[in-house]
Amino acid sequence: MFTSASNFTDSVDAVFLYITALSLIVLVGITITMIYFVIRYSRKRNPVPTHVEENLTLEILWTGIPLILFLSMFYFGWVGYKDMRAIPDDAMQIKVTARMWQWSFEYPNGLKTDTLYVPVNKPVRTELRSNDVSHAFFIPAFRIKKDVYPSKLNDLWFKSDKIGRYDIACAEYCGLKHSGMYSAVYIMEQEKFDTWYKETSAKAGLQATLTAPVKK
Ligand SMILES: [Cu+2]
């Protein structure tokens, strides 16, 4: 589960583990306290009810501690999210188009593919558009996901240092064959990518350039 396949994997997994661990601690803590109270303050042991006065210290503590814990979850999530929004200027630009029920990718020179091929260790910025309904671009191994709308342009970036093939899924229910809306991203050695890009572009009658004007 915890394999590092992109620049975001470690931070997302860390936040995930942190939230799970904290939730478990809180769950166990509350359950133990509850069981203790049920036994300690049962009617059998306390036939006469006591009137309980307010306790300001206790109230501040049980408000303050959970607040700090929950805000810390937010903080770590926010830090990771900020990195996801800081798109490097030298990122390779790929236009991603979603439609029921497939993905298509367009390289800066106009080359179109149904599978994504990118070089290893290269930042990639994907521009996400939909031709019909709402979809979501999801690469589970990279821990990145973003909604894809017909009316609004979204973008997302990643960098992978692990050669391999990774699933691209649609993570927003988009109709009958939503569950089959898969593609893949291949992370390739730079030279292999260059060769692939040159050959595939040539077949499509295109020049193998990666320097089309950046549109933001
Ligand atoms: Cu979809």
Image: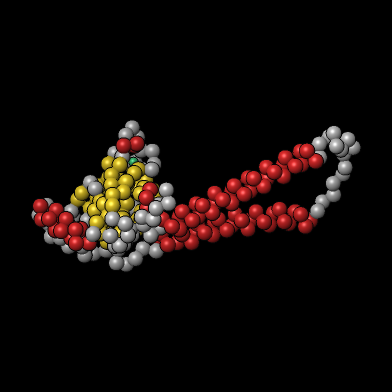
Residue 179 lies left or right of residue 75; in this view the side is left
Which residue reaches farthest bottom? 89
Which residue reaches farthest top? 176
Q: Quadrant of ligand 1?
A: top left
Q: In which quarter of the image is residue 10?
A: bottom left
Which residue reaches farthest right? 48
Way the structure is coloured: secondary structure
Residue 194 lies left or right of residue 169; in this view the side is left
Q: In which quarter of the image is the C terminus?
A: bottom left
Residue 212 lies left or right of residue 66; in this view the side is left
Viewer-side residue, 35 vs 81: 35
Viewer-side residue, 139 vs 147: 139
Q: Is residue 141 visible?
A: yes
Relative height, residue 194 to residue 181 (above, below): below
Identify which residue is drawn at 34% across, 53% down.
Answer: 153
Q: Could you tell me residue 5's position as x and y percent? A: 36, 55
Q: Can residue 125 be seen in this view?
A: no
Q: Could you tell me residue 202's position as x and y percent? A: 10, 56
Tag count: 0
Identify which residue is drawn at 45% across, 58% down.
Answer: 11
Q: Could you tell me residue 4's position as x and y percent? A: 39, 55
Q: Could you tell me residue 2's position as x and y percent? A: 42, 51
Identify which residue is drawn at 29% across, 39% down.
Answer: 101
Identify which residue is drawn at 77% across, 57% down.
Answer: 57
